[in-house]
Amino acid sequence: MNARLSSFAAALLAAPFAAAPALAHHGWGGQSDTQIELSGKVHRLVSLAGPHASMQIIADGQVWDVTLAPAARTEAAGLTPKSLAVGDAVTVRGNRNNDPKRFEIKTVRVSTTGRVYNVYPDRIK
């Protein structure tokens, strides 16, 4: 009986941790419905860590957080940490965060000289 109770208690304690990745994932609800294009230079290289790949660019003197697709989807689009170098000129297309104080864009496309990475091709408007 104690073994069953211990197993139940362990499962109960583990449940919130199993849900954590799903809670960390963020959809499109906090983003504007309108897509914009933002041109700048790579400030921080593509990272494939976390629930979504990410990078940073500097545009109009401001550092922008660029949220990409989940890592596997971003990599399948050809965008990896080796695809771009710090200082490369890029244009990102996507949906800006609804909070104007946050310089964050959830991106559907990243383009640079001679290369286009469609990380969410089904969402490009």
Image: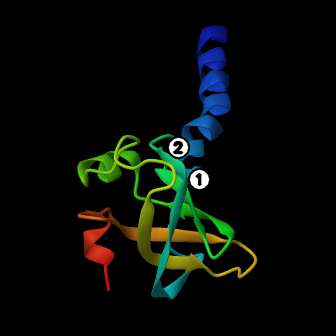
Q: Nearer the viewer, residue 40 or 31?
A: 40
User: What's the distance in space between the residues labelled 2 and 1, CA to CA?
Assistant: 12 Å
- Residue 72 relative to residue 103: left or right: left
Say which quarter of the image contains residue 121. bottom left
Q: Quadrant of the C terminus?
A: bottom left
**What amino acid is labelled 2 in the image?**
Gly
Question: Please, what secondary structure does the residue beneath circle 2 have?
Answer: loop
Q: Is residue 90 above or below residue 73?
A: below
Instruction: Give x and y (percent) for residue 38.
Output: 50, 77
Say which quarter of the image contains residue 62. bottom right
Q: Is residue 22 above or below residue 117?
A: above
Q: Residue at x 43, y 71 (%)?
A: 92
Say which quarter of the image contains residue 60. bottom right
Question: Please, what secondary structure does the residue beneath circle 1 have?
Answer: helix
Residue farthest along the bottom direction in this orientation: 34
Instruction: Give x and y (percent) for residue 85.
Output: 44, 47
How many marks are shown on the rendered structure? Answer: 2
Q: Which residue is mark 2?
A: 50
Q: Which residue is mark 1?
A: 23
